[in-house]
Image (cartoon, coloured by chain):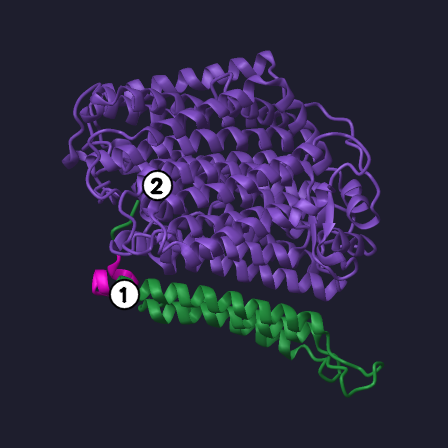
Chain colours: A green, B purple
Amino acid sequence: MTVLPYLVAGWIFLIGVYGLVTSRDLIHAVGCLAVTQSSTYVLLLAVGYRNGGTAPVFADAPTDSRVVDPVVQALTLTDIVVGATVTALLLALVVQLRKRHGTVDPDALSELKG
Amino acid sequence: MDTARLLPLVVAVPLLGAAVLVATGRRLPRLVSDIVGCAFAAATAAMALLVLFRAGHPGPGTYPVEWVGGWRRVGIVLVGDPLGAGLAALVSLLVVAVLVYSWRYFEEPPRRHTGSFPALVLVFQAGMCGFALTGDLFNAFVFFELMGAVAYALTGFRVEEPKPLQGALAFGVVNSLGAYVTLLGITLLYARTGELGFAQIGRRLDAEGPDGLVLAAFVLVTTGLLVKAAAVPFHFWLPDAHAVAPTPVCMLLSGVMVELGVYGVARVYWTVFSGPGGLSHPDFTRALLVLGVLTALLGAVMCWQQRHLKRLLAFSTVAHTGLFLIGVAVLTPEGMSGTALYVLGHAGVKAALFACAGVLLDRYATVDEHELFGRARELPAVGVLFALGGLGLCGLPPFGSGLGKAAAEEAAGHTAGWLPALYVLVSAVTGGAVLRAGLRIFAGVGRRPRDEEEGGPETTGEEEPETGGRLVRIPVPLLAVPAALLAASLALGVIPAVGSAVGRAGALFTDTGGYRRTVLDGHTAAAPAHLPPHWQLTGILLGLLSTALAITLATLAVRRPVHTGTAALLAPVRRLQSGHIGDYVAWLIAGTALLTVLTVPGVR
């Protein structure tokens, strides 16, 4: 087991956050949020990986064969479903904002202050 | 029937109701879909109360635990301990109140979408009940995101207006990022222990000593929950979202959703990290106390500065969340039960205040304190409710919020002697701001405020009414619901049985060993020795003091001429609330760093 996947997960999270903070376009910002979420997939799968393990499907493999952790795969799938919902909802809000406001630049949205 | 079997139904019934409404809502007339929505919410409330009643009475199998589908080893566990079940009951009752309120509130739902609002509220209810009842960390994340996603949609429900969209977007981005941070922490815990249940993780962690990984997991998990709880500096989304969401939604957001974040922090700490393998008690107290005090002070200061009524109430929620966090941070059964009672009383009072603000919005198409000056003299009933709400917010005895505040501040006083003063000050300032607005709007006391004298960034309250046209006569539900909520909040402080039940709930909640034995081994947990919240002389006097202070502040504010000195002094603080999503995300990361710094001495 190497430490590389964990570093990759951390790096993906950080560049996603960096993109969110500096974003000048809300669609880009929602994309960056999806990027930060990808780091959770990478971390989950890295945690459940076993060297030499195969997919946790026992249909054509002996029941004592070495497999990767199926729990994290279920968690990742759930996470993807959650993420898809949130991303779709936020993008819909951005589309509507563009219609009503005529802009997707967060710097131009200044009605809520103080 | 076994009460434990009801636990999954508390989550499933509202979801079923939402499905029914989505399938049939478009064909049903408005009245029928509202009744269907209310019926499903009320049925859930009845079941949650039944679970609570069972959990609140000592006997064999003290509180119900249900392994969904009978999968004991890897399954999903729902736990009806008195505090979680109580929160689920509170959520359900408030949802019923909100659905009755919105019966006449949204007079014109979007054409051919009659059932969409009650359906969304029911999904929201399912998410919140699930979060309160779950005994599993990953499920807590799923319910966290479920209630989050519905809350974003409800915040931006009026899609034809630009402001709600902005608020919903900031809410969505910041909260989802918080949820993903929590998931990173959950993954680390899974990597260490191979478990996902609160009780299982806690047991495995306690088999070894704490190290950097456990601490990192604690910081990450807590960050997301604190984002939901709107602790400083994670709070920026809250005023933006609460100020623009439809009023019935605000009642739920401020009344229970934010408090569920505080509950999450307390639940995760007590069941997972409070043993020898987690974070030591002094370290947790220090970290949460710092954030709680910052939150309370900043919320109070910002609350006083607002003229947008809903934004004012939103910042008062931030301030009170700070007080709740302090009550959790002192780590005693008394602090926990006092805070639980404070949350119950606060929910009634705050929802009633939002309901009054909603009446003003629909009648005058504004919630701006300056614009409404003296105009609502014709609504004495709403004025009385608003004033009572303000007094309840100050902690005036015998409101439930007053009893909760008294118990929590006493418990906090044992940890640090100056904390009761903070409770008094913060509740006086937030209650005073509400009373000041009430005096101006409903009585027209003092000088008419002039806009040009105000400096700095400002959100004013020019809004579209949420009904089809402006209200001429106030419909009965719009008055009955806040009146009932205030009466309930008052009753909480008067009925002694409430105090003893909450005291028992707090004692069971803080009994980590008992929780683990009940969930994992099926043993019964007896409530350890505890002191239920009850009226004491010091508590009554401090409650009266904060009320007197609030009335003085409010009278001074409406009498004295507006001067810009304090406003100029606080302008930098107000500028932080920039409405920019990037800034809010940067603050979230800064907050995570702060939390890390505060807990690092815990590494041994």
Q: Quadrant of residue B355?
A: top left
Q: Quadrant of residue B364?
A: top left
> Which residue is label 1 attached to?
A105
**Residue B158 is at least partly visible in this image:** yes
Where disc 1 sits, the SS reads loop
Q: Nearer the viewer, residue B246 or B71?
A: B71
Amino acid under disc 2: Thr
**Would residue A102 be counted in the magenta stretch?**
yes
Where disc 2 sits, the SS reads helix
Q: Nearer the viewer, mark 1 or mark 2?
A: 2
Q: Is residue B469 left or right of residue B139?
A: left
Q: Is residue B155 left or right of residue B561?
A: right
Q: How many marks?
A: 2
Q: Residue at x 72, y 32 (%)?
A: B507
Within-10-Å neighbours for mark 1: few <14, some 14–19, many 20+: some
Q: Residue at x 41, y 48 (%)?
A: B118
Q: Position of residue B115 (x, y in %)?
A: 38, 52
Q: Position of residue B409 (x, y in %)?
A: 57, 25
Q: Which mark is residue A38?
A: none
Within-10-Å neighbours for mark 2: few <14, some 14–19, many 20+: many
Amino acid under disc 1: Asp
Q: Nearer the viewer, residue B403 or B430?
A: B403
> Which residue is label 2 attached to?
B247
Question: The N terminus of chain B is located in which quarter?
Answer: top right
